[in-house]
Image (cartoon, rainbow, N blue to C red):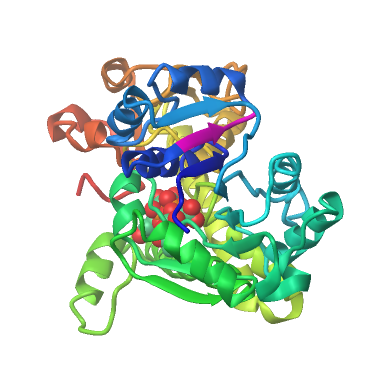
Amino acid sequence: MTFNSLSVVGLGYVGLPTAAIFAGRGLDVLGVDINAEIVELINQGKVHLVEPDLDKVVHDAVGAGKLRAATEPEPADAFILAVPTPFTDDRKPDLSHLQAAAESLKGVLKKGDLIVVESTVPVGATESLSARLSNLCPGLSFPHEAGAEADIMIAHSPERVLPGHVIRELTQNDRVIGGISPRCGERAAALYRLVVEGECLLTTAPTAELVKLSENAYRDVNIAFANELSVICDRLGIDVWEAVELANHHPRVDVLQPGPGVGGHCIAVDPWFIVDSAPDDTDLIRAARKVNDAKPHHLAGRIADAARGLKDPVIACLGLAYKADIDDLRESPAITVVRELAGAGVGEILAVEPHVDALPPALDGLDNVTKANLEEALERADVVVLLTDHRVFKDVPRKRLEGKRVFDARGVWR
Ligand code: SAJ
C-alpha cells in the first residue's frame, strides 16, 4: 500500500522541514502545531525559523497545494511525531508533549495507519506510547500486544539532522528505524524511502531509542574532552587550538573543538536520558555533562578577572545562539556566560546577536546588559568576547580588535 497522505505533528526545526520535504515528493501533507500563529504563517508559505533553504522548500510546497498546516490532526495514512522531549528540573525525561501529541490522534486513527516517533525518547518510550494509545482506542489493536497482526503500526525513527544543514541531512543521512514489530519497521522504512537517499537501517524500537541517545552522548563526551583540555591549557599557558591542531595530525586522533560549553536542546539534554535509565552505570556520561556545563563558568570567571583590572569597562559579548549561523538560543552556554558576567557586576555588557530581535528572558531586565549591534559594540568595547562563531563575527577585521582585551572562545580569530 502506498502512502498518499501524511500528518506531521510538531512544526519545529525537525517537523517543518520533514513535512515540506515529503510534500515536495508529492504526498498530501498536513502539518499540525498547537501554536496558531505558526500555523497561520506556514499557510501563507512563510517560516518561523532561521534554517538555510527552509523558507524556499516550505514556500514551494505550500504554493503547490501539497502542504497545509492546522492546529488539529486529520485522518492520514501516516503520522510523524516531532515534538520536543525536554527534561524536567531534576533531569528526568519530560514526555508530556509527546504523550499529548499521540493522544491527539485518537479520534483520527484507523486500521492500517502508521505512527512514527521521531522525537528523541528514553529506552522503552515507544512501546509505552503504544500501550497508552491502545487504552484510548479500544476498537483498534496495537503492536506492543498484537505484534504483526496489529491494526496500527508504530516505529521509532530518531531524527539525526544537524541544525544549519537540515534540508540536506534529512534526505542524505542514513536512517535508523526501530519497529515495535518487524512489520512496523518495514512499513516505516517504506515511508522514509520516499525521501531518504541514505540507507534505512532496521532494528527494534528500544535499540533505535538507545542508538539516538548514544550518538549525542558520544559527541558530548568528546566535546567534554576538548573542553577539559582547554581548561588545562588555560592553567598551563598553552594555546589549546594549536595543541588540538597538532594532536590531530596523529592518524588515530581527532580531538573536537573546545568552546564556551555545549548548548542546544539535544546534546545538552539527551545524555541525561541514558543516565536516568541506568544511573549506576553512567559515570563517564555524567562526568562529560559536568565538564561541559562547567565550561561557561570557567570562561565567565576569566573574563571577570580581566575586567576587574580595568576602570568602568565595556564588555562586548558576540553571539547568544548556541552555535554558528542559527537563531536557536536553547541551553546556550553563551547566555550563561553573559548572565554570570552580569552577576559579577564588573562592567557594562553589550550583547550582540544579529539573528534575534530582542534579549532572551534570561537576560532581559538585567540593568548592566543591553542588546547592541556589532558596530556599536566594537566601537565601545574594552573587552571583546567571541561566544558564537557566526560568519559575520569571523569576518571582523583584526584591526578592529587592536588595543582591546580579547577572549575568543571559538578559536576563530587566531
Ligand atoms: N560543539 C563544540 N565543539 C565541537 C562541536 C560542537 O563545542 O567540536 C558545541 C556547539 O557549539 C554546540 C553544541 O556543541 O553548542 C552542539 O552542537 P552540534 O553541532 O555538535 O550538535 P547539535 O546539538 O546542533 O545537533 C546534534 C547532532 N548530533 C550529533 O552530531 C551526534 C545532530 O545530528 C542531531 O540530530 C541533533 O543533535 C539532535 O537533534 O539530536
Residue 411, position as x, y percentages in the image: 27, 51
Quarter of the figure with residue 393: top left
Whether the magenta-drawn stretch holds residue 31 is answered as yes
User: Can you see residue 312?
Assistant: no
Residue 49, position as x, y percentages in the image: 42, 30
Residue 217, position as x, y percentages in the image: 53, 67
The main secondary structure of the magenta stretch is: strand
Whether the magenta-drawn stretch holds residue 1 is answered as no
Residue 196, position as x, y percentages in the image: 34, 58
Please state if 400 lies on the left or on the right of 238 as rendered. left
Residue 192, relative to residue 300: is it above or below? below
Question: Residue at the location (33% across, 43% down)?
Answer: 164
* Viewer-closest of 227 and 231: 227
* Viewer-closest of 53 and 140: 140
Please state if 164 lies on the left or on the right of 119 as rendered. left
Residue 180, relative to residue 331: is it above or below? below
Question: Residue at the location (52% across, 45% down)?
Answer: 301
Quarter of the figure with residue 247: bottom left
* Viewer-closest of 31 and 86: 31
Question: Residue at the location (22% across, 67% down)?
Answer: 245
Magenta-highlighted residues: 29-34
